[in-house]
Amino acid sequence: MAPSFIESGFSTRVEYEQWLTGTPSGVGSATGVQPFSKNLTVYYWPMMGRAGAVMRMLDYAGVPYKHKSEFGEIASVCGAFGAQTTVFAPPVVVDGDYTMSQSTATAMYVGKKCGLTKGMDEDKALQILADLIDTFENGIGAAADKGGSSLKQFFEDGEPSRFAKLMGNIERNIQGPYFFGASLTVPDFVLAALTDWQDFTKLEVRINGHEPSGGERRRALSLLTPLLLFSCGEQRLKKEKGFDPWSGYPKAAAVVAAVRALPSYKVNQLQVVRDGFYAKDELFAAYR
């Protein structure tokens, strides 16, 4: 049996595989990027949520880590809950003596250490991450927080709508098949994680014609095909209101489908969102 990447002296599976194929990832002592510590820990609530990109990249790279999700554990490292630290709120990544927070900052930190930077323009990637947050959290999320009518206005009002302008920008930044060409990089995982969140909290996923609940909800993404809402998953917003937000963005759809098709994506069964965050009936009733 071939030795594991750790036994071979590599810090991540990505680095090992790229070494085998003669395409070094840029991770390791040659470039000054240090490997992860042995006690790498992700602090976040018991769901993927805003830590989704970080955990998906670590899973893909084969990097061992702990996920601490109890309130007391999270409070011990976050200034928002009284800890005298340099990070405010989860997600928080603790890598030895180094602590980092914020969803995009932790994603970039973890992605670089996982070797997910091949062909990536780091400065442009930072812009793309900010654009993704503007589109998904400050756009879809903020509109939905104001109610269904506001969400409809964001999605559909105007020629083109605010959403269409933002997503058009995202689409044009994807070189194909991924953001920076042939290799998965940090923005690809962030796009997939943000889409996962919005699919469940704003658009509503249904399985076999009914709303998933309990264990079904926790396993929903792994039960559906990798293309999920982009192709054959049933989307409540589309079915009831006749509007499919993702239909006009094939390159973004392909990125999300590719990340969801990764074996590591299916292995991690942590729920994407927990109870209390799923789309509410009131949101769809007011979408008019």
Image (tube, rainbow, N blue to C red):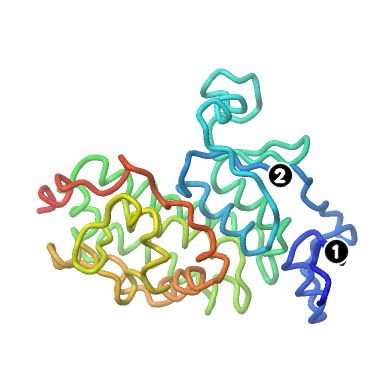
Few, some or many residues within 10 Å of mark 1 (<14, 14–19, 20+): few
| Residue 205 in the image, given as x and y percentages of width and height | 28, 60
Quadrant for the N terminus in the image: bottom right
| Residue 80 in the image, given as x and y percentages of width and height | 52, 24
- Name the kind of residue labelled 1 in the image: Glu
Label 1 to label 2: alpha-carbon separation = 18 Å
Few, some or many residues within 10 Å of mark 2 (<14, 14–19, 20+): some
Total residue callouts? 2
From what the image shows, is residue 166 above or below residue 285?
below
Horizontal relation, residue 220 to residue 234: left or right: right
Work out whether residue 168 or residue 26 is closer to the camera in this orientation and state it: 26
* Secondary structure found at label 1: loop
Horizontal relation, residue 100 to residue 166: left or right: right
Horizontal relation, residue 20 to residue 83: left or right: right
**Residue at the farthest front position:** 1
**Labelled disc at residue 236:** none
**Residue at the farthest bottom position:** 21
| Residue 246 in the image, given as x and y percentages of width and height | 32, 68
Work out whether residue 200 or residue 162 is closer to the camera in this orientation and state it: 200
Work out whether residue 141 or residue 174 is closer to the camera in this orientation and state it: 141
Which residue is painted at 58% across and 29% down in the image?
73
From what the image shows, is residue 122 above or below residue 106?
below
**Labelled disc at residue 7:** 1
Which residue is painted at 19% across and 62% down in the image?
210
Which residue is painted at 69% across and 65% down in the image?
117
First in sequence: mark 1 vs mark 2: 1
Residue for badge 2:
40
| Residue 3 in the image, given as x and y percentages of width and height | 83, 71
Q: Nearer the viewer, mark 1 or mark 2?
A: 1
- Name the kind of residue labelled 2 in the image: Leu
* Secondary structure found at label 2: loop
